[in-house]
Amino acid sequence: MRTPAKIGSRYILSVLQEYADDRSELEELYIAAPRYAETLSLVYDQLSTRRSKRILDFGTGSGWMAMLIKSLFSWHDVVASDVEISEKVKMRLEKARIQPVDKCMFKGGSPLVFNDGCFDICLLLEVLEHVVEDPRYVMHEMHRILSSQGFLYITTPNIAHVYNRFLLLMGRQPQLYLTGYKGTRGHFREWTMAELVNLLQDSGFGIADRRYLDAVSSMGNVRERIPLRLSYYPYKALVKIRPSFRSQIFVAAKTNGLPTDVID
């Protein structure tokens, strides 16, 4: 088993790139690998325990995080769910001995398809910003399907990211929802750290950890657009000094409602 120090972007690419069927998936992996590595290092302590756990990767997308977890911690029972999972993704998940569950969504206050307390860990990674339902209902469902000592791990874009602050100063909406944006990255609701922590605590969770992550890499738009490329290293220096300007929020929450050490 690899230690957190050795779970870097290169290792993640070495595990997953053979499953990428085309250039767009490979590009997706290169962009996401630093975020995957940082997230895995933060959940490592819970995943590395030898007791087998049932883990849900909710909103699995291409299935990369579920496959990474199964590759590193093969003794866990991993379930990958989403609104829709393509046949291609289903095939590679099943090949990795991961159960795919599609048509799984928050809708109209109806419960999710999972039984009460059936998971030890739920991952809600880059999902919450896309959900149009009441976030209190979302957290109620996460709490319901987790065990009495369960953990919920959330990553989501930081609405207070320095780039979003610049967009607002320019009169533009950073969340890209119903603003004429033609891509697939529409965000219905982004969060500040304080808002997300309050939501979790009001839903009966205790906060085990919270911190800011930086998912901005030198790939993708940064590589293709000269202004972004020129500002990349100054940006990295700024967020090192001011972590709250970073692009992502990470929160670890416990269902028993008892907080442990919190890192600001």
Image (cartoon, rainbow, N blue to C red):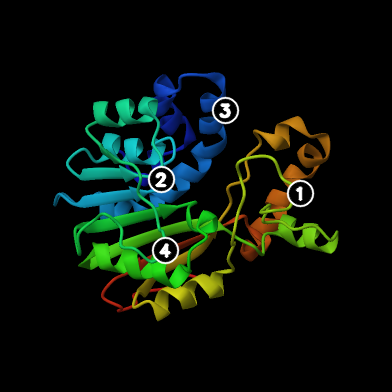
Image quadrant of residue 110?
Answer: bottom left
Q: Nearer the viewer, mark 3 or mark 4?
A: 4
Label 1: few (<14), some or many (≥20) within 10 Å? few
Query: Which residue in the protein does label 2 denote?
Result: 83
Q: Earlier in the sequence, mark 3 or mark 2?
A: 3
Query: Which residue in the protein does label 3 denote?
Result: 27
Cα distance in 3D space between marks 3 and 4:
35 Å
Query: Which residue in the protein does label 1 denote?
Result: 234
Q: Amino acid at mark 1?
A: Pro
Q: Earlier in the sequence, mark 3 or mark 4?
A: 3
Q: Can the viewer see residue 1? A: no
Query: Which residue in the protein does label 4 denote?
Result: 108
Q: Amino acid at mark 2?
A: Val
Q: Residue at x 73, y 43 (%)?
A: 232
Q: Is residue 168 above or below residue 13?
A: below
Left or right relative to 90: residue 28: right
**Disc 3 and disc 4 in contact, CB within 8 angstroms:** no
